[in-house]
Image (tube, rainbow, N blue to C red):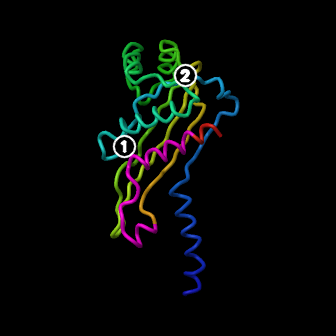
Amino acid sequence: MTRTIRLTLPAALLALAACASGGQNYHDKNMDFGSVRTVAVMPIVNLSRDNLAGERVRDVITSMMLASGAFYVVPQGEVIRVVAKAGVLNPATPTVEDVVKFGTILKVDAVITGTVKEYGEVRAANASGNVIALSLTMQECATGKIVWTGTTTRGGVTWRDRLLGGGGAPLNEVTETAVDDLISKLFK
């Protein structure tokens, strides 16, 4: 029995570590991502318990995409103004037609949409930590076609936190790590 535990424990720990930081990624092989210069980040769908998670994550996405230097990100006020002008009923989950119309009016190459699935504190025994589960999608505005999607989960309660107690990394730091992970997946 003891030998079985010694053999399966490392495999289980490896599987847990892979789940905590992994995520899926899709790239359209026919898309020239170098041609995308201007993007608009739409409101983010929030499925978490924190009512402001979508806005907080959207702000981090916008800042980090600008900081990457790869894109010009349209200011959020302009996005809101053109959403109303284009008649987009649900900007967090726009239709293909909405993306094409929106992109034509705002003159952007792509639209970023996303979903916050989990955001905030999680507890495990005597420890707690902050976690975020996030997915992003890029649609090109010429056709409305999805050209990239990525998902990631970051943060949580580590083994160190469980053994020594503690609260893990601050939520903004965990969010920045998750967004950085997604942006790096976009450029792969």
110 to 105, vertically: above or below: below
Query: Which quarter of the picture shows residue 163?
Result: bottom left
29 to 7, vertically: above or below: above
The front one of 120 and 26 is 120
2 to 131, vertically: above or below: below
Q: Which residue is mark 1?
A: 47
Main secondary structure along the magenta-highlighted residues: helix
* Local SS, label 1: loop
How packed is label 1: few (under 14 Cα within 10 Å), some, or many (20 or more)? some
Q: Position of residue 117 (x, y in %)?
A: 41, 46
Q: Is residue 9 left or right of residue 47?
A: right
* Local SS, label 2: strand
The front one of 97 and 125 is 125
Range of magenta residues: 159-183
Rendered residue at 46%/33% (across/down) = 63
Mark 2 / mark 1, whichever is N-terminal:
2
Disc sitting over residue 63 in the figure? none
Disc sitting over residue 38 in the figure? 2
